[in-house]
Image (tube, rainbow, N blue to C red):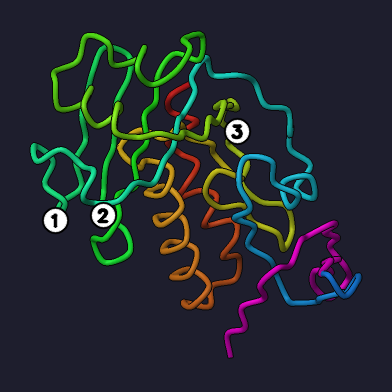
Amino acid sequence: MTEILLGTEIRAVEETASGVAIETVTDKGSEPVEGAWLAGCDGLRSVVRRAVKLPTAVAGAGLKAWRAVLPASAVPSAFDMREVTVWLGPKAHLVLYPVRKGREANVVIIGDDRVAGPADVAERWAAPARELIAATPTWTPWTLHDRSPDARLKRGRIALLGDAAHAALPSLAQGAAFAIEDAVVLARLVAEGGPAPFDAYQEARSCGWRNSR
């Protein structure tokens, strides 16, 4: 049975003699959760990563993401709201895709974090991109951070997936792709019932990092 717990924060993770113990916190207070093993996919500032005894420090990437949602009616006609659009510029890019059944558009611009805002990122871009930016009244800025990859992805009964394991900057959804690939490989190895599925997972998913060093 699968249970999804909303509004739940992981505070601490500890491997025990028989499995893994997790301390979770909700608006009702602290609640312990136990299981046979744990796959942590909790992002760049992963709590689970600390339990695997890996470095947790992050560094600025020199990039910033500006995000916004606007009505589909405000999107210039050059953008097809039926598709995902990726607009590539010098050291920057823009992504637009439909949300809420096409009634709205999600827009993300990534560029140098030293510039004032999206208009400065795209000042030399073609008119449709500049028109889209001008039609967006409010942006939420997100400074991007990164971490060097590590060949170790597990410790005992605890494994790491996605950005918790190997952080990726948001280029062509590579972070999401890594997480999905990790999950597929780990699920297959666990389902096969081999003697050491986490060891096999680490071997399968970390070889690229070792070969790139």
Q: Residue at x 48, y 78 (%)?
A: 191
Secondary structure beneath dot 2 equals strand
Instruction: Inspect the magenta stretch and tell me whether residue 104 lies in it.
Output: no
Which residue type does callout 1 highlight?
Arg
Do labels 2 and 1 touch, CB within 8 Å? yes
Q: Residue at x 8, y 37 (%)?
A: 78
Q: Residue at x 49, y 23 (%)?
A: 64
Which residue type does callout 2 highlight?
Pro
Foreground label between 3 and 2 = 2
Residue projecting furthest to the bottom: 1
The magenta-colored residue range is: 1-26
**In this figure, which residue is indicated by the disc labeled 3?**
150
Q: Which mark is residue 98?
A: 2
Left or right, residue 108 beside residue 62 = left
Left or right, residue 81 beside residue 1 = left
Left or right, residue 91 beside residue 117 = left
Q: If you read the primary sequence from the N terminus, does the residue marked by circle 1 or circle 3 appear first? A: 1
Secondary structure beneath dot 1 equals loop
Q: CA distance from mark 2 to mark 1?
A: 7 Å
**In this figure, which residue is indicated by the disc labeled 1?**
82
Q: Position of residue 23 (x, y in %)?
A: 86, 66
Q: If you read the primary sequence from the N terminus, does the residue marked by circle 3 or circle 2 appear first? A: 2
Q: CA distance from mark 3 to mark 2?
A: 35 Å
Query: How many dots with numbers?
Result: 3
Crowd band around label 1 with a 10 angstrom C-alpha radius: few (<14), some (14–19), many (20+): few
Indicate the quadrant where residue 44 lies.
top right
Secondary structure beneath dot 3 equals loop
Q: Position of residue 66 (x, y in %)?
A: 45, 30
Q: Is residue 150 above or below residue 7?
A: above
Q: Position of residue 1 (x, y in %)?
A: 58, 91
